[in-house]
Image: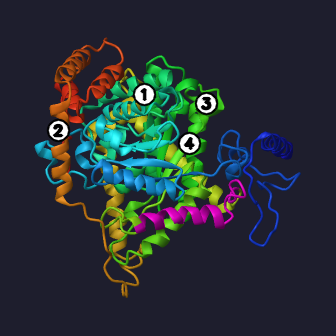
Amino acid sequence: MAEDIEAGRARWQARYDAARKRDADFTTLSGQQVDPVYGPPPGSTVPGFERVGWPGEYPYTRGLHPTGYRGRTWTIRQFAGFGNAVQTNERYKMILASGGGGLSVAFDMPTLMGRDSDDPHSLGEVGHCGVAIDSAADMDVLFDGIPLGETTTSMTISGPAIPIFCMYLVAAERQGADIGALNGTLQTDIFKEYIAQKEWLYPPEPHLRLIGDLMEYCAEHIPAYKPLSVSGYHIREAGATAAQELAFTLADGFGYVELGLSRGMDVNAFAPGLSFFFDAHIDFFEEIAKFRAARRIWARWMRDRFGATSEKAQWLRFHTQTAGVSLTAQQPYNNVVRTAVEALSAVLGGTNSLHTNALDETLALPTEQAAEIALRTQQVIMEETGVTNVADPLGGSWYIEALTDRMEEEAERIFAHILRMGAGRDHAIGPVTSGILAGIESGWFTSEIAESAFRYQQALEKEDKRIVGVNRHTSTVSGELEILRVGHEVEREQRRVLAERRAARDQAAVDAALADLLAATRDPGSGNLIPLILRAARAEATLGEICGTMGEEFGEYTEDPRF
């Protein structure tokens, strides 16, 4: 109805007028004035417009805020970590000094698997795909000179996320920060580990117990901190389609909502602490549609299925990273172009924060120069292109709206299948959780992703899909890149420092803290485990010691092989 459209326009205008705007020039390069949002002409009728709507109101297809990026631009949050804490600290200071708005920590493989740097399984891996963190003392060094009370920090880790989080809290305490005011994000998403990335420590149930404890702890003690970043990025990187990434990720999010509700938490209180992490791939319009559909689906499910009544509980906030899997070792300078296109799709899709990959990341960790180019890519988009002037500038495009609808329909079909898989299991947490666990146990998620990856590879080999420099336009004048290499001396030094710290700590305090943690782990009714893990971190218990202690009760998880 035309009257409904006009009423929505009036609501948007009132919200826009009341909102804070940046002091910036919102004209085109030629000096032409542009409106902050565009919609149907006054008096027109647009069937289904309620699914599109206006920025800042349900179903949030066009964004969470009436101002779009006129109110606040996305956070430039570059993902970084390599070698030891000293080296990574230097890179963080470079990123912040160059205009980065927040930090995102990449951990090495031993840390991601909850192992210490001197664990035999860590040999040859220390510092190679991220920074090595063994104890709270490493966190002190990692953030030396970076006030955690003033810096939003994201940490991309799931299996041992809770002990790492506690070490981060200890580092903030030692800086004198107000812990209750900390702001950041911990990934913690264990479902996607079983689905795609395969970096778990324990079976699903113990991990869900720890995640529930973390949700409760943050809601009570650190309300601005987001204890869960539900990650579709790794699902997409494993070979999923855009629709699978969207559906599997949101289903995981619904499972965590069920987890919070099963703990007796108020959905309006804990849901704002859930955030999301998506991939921005190379198919420009499909990605924009995916982001818009994600907001709309999440808002509807939160309102209609889970009873969320507050706006913030219905909001889907998300971080985006450009597609690592789209980068090529052949003609690596082409990756600068790919990253810029992908970043622009994330911005036009309304991302809340963004990481842009470096041109050399398919070969090694980024050099300082490559990291700067990646950062400048975001800044060029933000400062020069005019895309921050108008909220959801592609809203109302017949193509974009059709793609958004199609993405939503495909996601709903997948949700229905997940619920059918869980039928009859009646897990105490909830029906979506039942379906997710059934899909993990049966290998359904893995097989669906593998099939999608196989179809895409076939299309590449038949040259139905094309990649410049790989199966098209393969001649080049480019030479080899200088890449960042992490030497073996990093591992030797990390092991030496770790040994010194073990020798210098109060071993009796460590032993007592770990003993109490083990006793509580063995007693399901013992209450929240976070304070006990935090006590162990304060005593300089190592990551491997803390994870190993809980593993004595929780056990290990082995995936059934399927071919």
Mark 1 or mark 4, which is nearer to you? Answer: 4
Residue 207 falls in image quadrant? top left
Depth check, front residue: 279 or 479? 479
Residue with the mark numbered 1: 431
Residue 363 falls in image quadrant? bottom left
Contact (CB < 8 A) between labels 1 and 4? no
Mark 2 or mark 1, which is nearer to you? Answer: 2
Q: Earlier in the sequence, mark 2 or mark 4?
A: 4
> Horizontal and vertical percent for residue 441?
27, 37
Give the magenta-colored segment's residue range.
369-395
Depth check, front residue: 318 or 139? 139
> Horizontal and vertical percent for residue 243?
47, 52
In what element is the residue under mark 2? Answer: helix
In what element is the residue under mark 4? Answer: loop
Residue with the mark numbered 2: 500
Question: Disc 3 versus disc 1: distance between alpha carbons?
Answer: 17 Å
Residue 325 falls in image quadrant? bottom left
The amino acid type of the residue labelled 4 equals: Arg
Q: Earlier in the sequence, mark 2 or mark 3?
A: 3
**Mark 2 surroundings within 10 Å by alpha-carbon count, few (fewer than 14), some (14 through 19), many (20 or more):** few
Residue with the mark numbered 4: 317
Q: Is residue 31 left or right of residue 477?
A: right
